Each structure stands twice: as C-alpha cells, then as structure tokens.
Amino acid sequence: MSIVIWEAVKQELEIPQRLSLKVVDKIQFENWKELEEYTNPKGQSLDDFFEPVIGYHEQAELLYFVCDGLENANEDGEIITKDSLLPIFIMLKSLVDCLLKKIY
C-alpha cells in the first residue's frame, strides 16, 4: 500500500528518492499523539473511525483508500489483525504527511 501512496503523491508533487528516517519518526510521533486516545475500532468502518483525522486532510481520498485497503485485508483476519489496524494506519498516514510537507 505504501507504493500506491508514493505513486499517487508522485503524480501531483515532485518527491525525493528516499525519506529521512528522522523526519518520518517525528511525523509518526505527531500522528500517534493526535490519535493516542483512540482505541482499535470496534464494530464500525475504518472510514467512520478515522473521520475526525481524515475529514479535512489535504489527501483525504488517499487516506480513505488506505482505510478501505486495511478493511479488505482485515476481512480474512489472518493478513491483518484488528490490533494492528491503528498502527498500520498511523504509519501510512505518516508517509502521506511526510510527502505532502515536502520534508525529506
């Protein structure tokens, strides 16, 4: 899914060949702070669960795509567990944020 994000953002922006790990860690930490009161979604779609975070995001469509992809992978229950949905979403949102902020 990270390759799809990279390619989608690359169509709109000029992006680097690689990202700085320090920058990714910083943005990922900020995203964790924003979502620290969230628990794993129980009985609701990921779109609804993450709506407060995604709603006004510059790349909301891309983040909704991420949610849909995670839900589809979660349907099997063996590919992605419910407990890993939140960390994976935060990691992928952090990638989007790094690329959009043009901080490499």
Image (tube, rainbow, N blue to C red):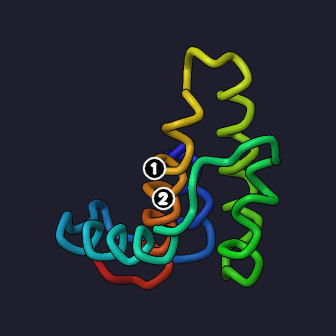
Does 48 appear above or below 67?
Answer: below
- Locate the C terminus by quadrant: bottom left
Where disc 1 sits, the SS reads helix
The answer to whether any part of residue 14 appears in the image is no
- Locate the N terminus by quadrant: top right
Toward the viewer: 68 or 48? 48
Q: Which mark is residue 87?
A: 1
Q: How many marks?
A: 2
Quarter-wise, where is residue 73 in the image? Answer: top right
What x and y, as percent, mark residue 65?
73, 52
> Callout 1: 10 Å neighbours few (<14), some, many (20+)?
few
The answer to whether any part of residue 46 appears in the image is yes
Toward the viewer: 31 or 100? 31
Per the image, the residue denoted by label 2 is 90
Name which residue lies at 36% across and 67% down. Answer: 28
Name which residue lies at 74% across and 59% down. Answer: 49
In the image, is 98 to the left or to the right of 60? left
Does 88 appear above or below 64?
Answer: above
Name which residue lies at 56% across and 42% down. Answer: 85
In the image, is 85 to the left or to the right of 70? left
Look at label 1 and name its amino acid.
Pro
Toward the viewer: 29 or 1? 29
> Callout 2: 10 Å neighbours few (<14), some, many (20+)?
some
Distance from Cα at disc 1 to Cα at disc 2: 5 Å
What x and y, as percent, mark residue 69?
69, 39
| CB atoms of marks 1 and 2 within 8 Å | yes
What x and y, as percent, mark residue 13?
54, 77
In the image, is 38 to the left or to the right of 59? left
Look at label 2 and name its amino acid.
Ile
Where disc 2 sits, the SS reads helix
